[in-house]
Image: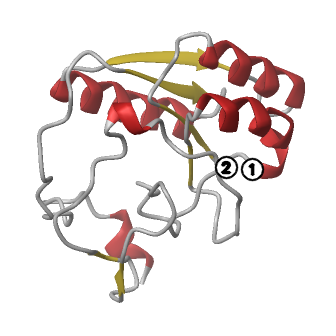
Amino acid sequence: MARQYEATPTSIPQQTPLTHPAARGKTFVDLVCENTQCHDIATGVQAAGRAIGWNVKLISYNDTQPNTLTAAFRQALQYQPVGVSLTGTAPALCSSVLPSYQKAGVPIFPASVGPIEVKSPSPRPSTGWPPTPSRPRPSPTGSSRSRTGTGTSFSSTSPPFRC
């Protein structure tokens, strides 16, 4: 079973078109830990940002020192981003910054942290982020999921949630 997940993908399974193009010139922040997978994902986030004309800022933190994550989250808000992502870090570690993110209306997109329920800060209505698909997307388990709340996870390894 593991072999199917180790193979290099030959296509992108997400085929739902956006209802409108992404607005150019937005800023998105990816928080990058010292682990290899964080750097690999950051490379993809940067490429995606370039493809849609966004400015992607990378901010490093040390996965073994929670205070560096908190500092990275605070620094990220200074850029007034349309969203902030991070990989592999338990959302409980970012609970102290949630009020600031909720007030600013900046969504946090954790990836690869497993199926957990997390409360939300909602996106700023003026950004148009996250883009609204024209129809519900199939979930990784094959069942249909619709957008609920005000944000969507873009991780293929976890259900929709926000930190």
Residue 162 visible in the shown view: yes
Which residue in the protein does label 1 denote?
Answer: 91
Residue 76 position, x and y percent, is 61, 18
Q: Is residue 143 above or below residue 109?
A: below
Q: Indicate the quadrant where residue 103 lies.
A: top right
Q: Label 1 sits on what residue type? A: Pro
Please report whichever mark, 1 or 2, sits nearer to the chain's N-terminal start: 1
Number of numbered discs present? Answer: 2
Does 121 sit left or right of 30 as displayed?
right
Which residue is at 83% across, 50% downward? 92
Task: Decide: few, some or many residues near mark 2? Use Cα within 10 Å; few <14, some 14-19, many ≥20.
Answer: many
Between 93 and 106, the residue placed more toward the observer is 106
Question: Dots 1 and 2: beta carbons under 8 Å?
Answer: yes
Horizontal side, residue 60 vs residue 143: left or right: right
Q: Residue at x 71, y 45 (%)?
A: 89
Q: How crowded is mark 1: few (under 14 residues within 10 Å), some or many (20 or more)?
A: many
Q: In this view, does 125 lie above or below 34?
A: below
Relative depth, front residue between 37 and 86: 86
In the picture provided, is 109 more to the left or to the right than 72?
left
Which residue bears the numbered disc 2? 163
Residue found 80% across the figure and 26% down from its top: 70
Q: Label 1: state its secondary structure.
A: helix
Which label lies toward us, 1 or 2? Answer: 2
Residue 155 sits above or below residue 115 on the image: above
Measured Cα–Cα span from mark 1 to mark 2:
5 Å
Q: What element carries label 2?
A: loop
- Quadrant containing the N terminus is bottom left
Q: Which amino acid does label 2 sit on?
A: Cys
Instruction: Estimate the x, y position of residue 108 in percent, counting from the top left.
Output: 58, 41
Q: Which residue is drawn at 36% across and 32% down?
A: 126
